[in-house]
Image: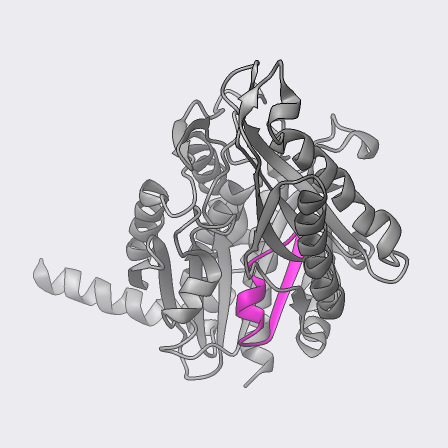
Amino acid sequence: MKTILRNFSLSLALLTPQIQATTSIPQLVEEITPSVIEWRRDIHQNPELSNREYRTSRVVAEHLRSLGLEVKTNIAKTGVVGILRGSTDGPVIALRADMDALPVTEKTGLPFASTVIGEYEGREVGVMHACGHDAHVAILMGVASVLSQIQSRLNGTVKFIFQPAEEGAPKGEEGGAKLMVDEGVLNDPPVDAIVGLHISQGGPAGTASYRTRGFMASAQRFDVRVEGKQTHGARPWSGIDPIVVSAQIINGLQTIVSRQIDITQHPAVVTVGTISAGVRMNIVPDEAVFSGTIRTFDSSVRREVHAKIRSIVENVSESMGAKGFVEIDPGVPVTFNDVDLAESLVPSLESVYGPSNVFQSPRITGAEDFSFFQEEIPGFFFFIGGRPESISPTNAIPNHSPYFSIDERALPPAVHAMSRIALDFLSSSR
């Protein structure tokens, strides 16, 4: 019996390269699609905030180990890396997916909608995959399954990077792509190029878009603190009202883009997203705080916007008898697609989606910390359409909305595209 089993195993080993050589990627994608959808729904129902992706990373690591990949965990806190070595030595391509969810209370009404409650910067919040990272993780898990079954056709190595904290680590913590880079994720083996994707309702399922050079904006967070003088709400003249001062500052910040930047040449955004002050309706507080985001595509414009924010905060505060302080974090760079890499990989996209379904995108004021990888090595980032048929283009729901949803028919072509890109890159780079 042992001899029979040994002979069977030997026969299977001899046949495996033949099976891999004849099995098509579309066939493998079709076979793995039910699992991809199941993974996506499970991750969607169990979202985790930045730097807290403990369950998600376990699910990913267990899957990669089941495929026989070399697996590294706890990179940049909760990151996971899987390494698939092909039949021959050659170049190394990295494929990346982000894992974290957002502090958003879901309102989609999906049967697998999130009901998770978490803690974000000291506040209790709903947690939701409102930016499609659940789909990104499931897609890359599917790609790992596909490529592991055609391992003998890989002329090099594929590194699967599952990244935490793309949305930004909680204040006071490190995280995300920058921390992964600092911890050496692009080394051992050294990566030659990296590819990532993002789903949105910008197009229907079955479409893809990209842009060479500057694609997505640089982004920084700013935090403002205004010190006033507390007094009774019935005697505002006895104090200095930081709420009114903050209102004047916020109005002033809106003039930076609308009146001080040539937005026909340099798109820019300054948005205030939070504001907090006071504890009671008849007390003028002694302090107000607010925070926001800055988006630019040009380094000189970025420096100019930062300088104007500081000037407005400090000078408006001083003019009203208060003191204003502003902090601007380093943020993330522009998502910059390497021209040569993009030109070499777009045909792979077109072979999956069809040339008429792959579009050149306008610049996007959203930001991606994928840009930290691109600062180190050539990178290519693209979008896939995921708008459900029931939603018209004019009513497309933006990422980060509590109503954000995707058409799951976008998942199989994305798995196919990423698999095709990896296979073609390793073949053409020999």
**Within the image, what quadrant is residue 428 found in?**
bottom right
Can you name the residue that lies furthest to the front here?
238
Residue nearest the viewer, comparing 295 with 361? 295
Spot occupied by residue 72 in the image (x, y as percentages of width and height): 30, 62
From the viewer's perspective, is residue 204 above or below residue 395?
below
Taking the magenta stretch, the answer to whether it contains residue 54 is no
**Res. 32 in view:** yes
What residue lies at 90% left-to-right and 58% top-to-bottom?
Answer: 264
Query: Percent from the top left, x then y, of residue 59?
Result: 33, 45
> Among all residues in the image, which is located at the extreme left?
2
Q: Quadrant of the N terminus?
A: bottom left
Does 370 lie within the magenta span? yes
The quadrant of the rendering that contains the C terminus is bottom right
Relative placement, left or right, of 77 versus 152 is: left
Range of magenta residues: 366-383
Task: Examine the rendered structure and indicate whether residue 112 appears above or below residue 66.
Answer: above
What residue sits 47% from the left and 34% below the top? 44
Percent across and percent down for residue 197 are: 60, 55
The residue sitting at 59% across, 22% down in the picture is 108
Q: Quadrant of residue 285?
A: top right
Q: Is residue 266 left or right of residue 417?
A: right
Q: Quadrant of residue 420?
A: bottom right
How many numbered marks appear? 0
Structure colour scheme: one colour
Say above or below: 63 vs 156: above
Q: Is residue 18 visible?
A: no
**Residue 238 percent location from the top left of the image:** 61, 25
Q: From the viewer's perspective, tell me whether residue 414 is left or right of residue 91.
A: right
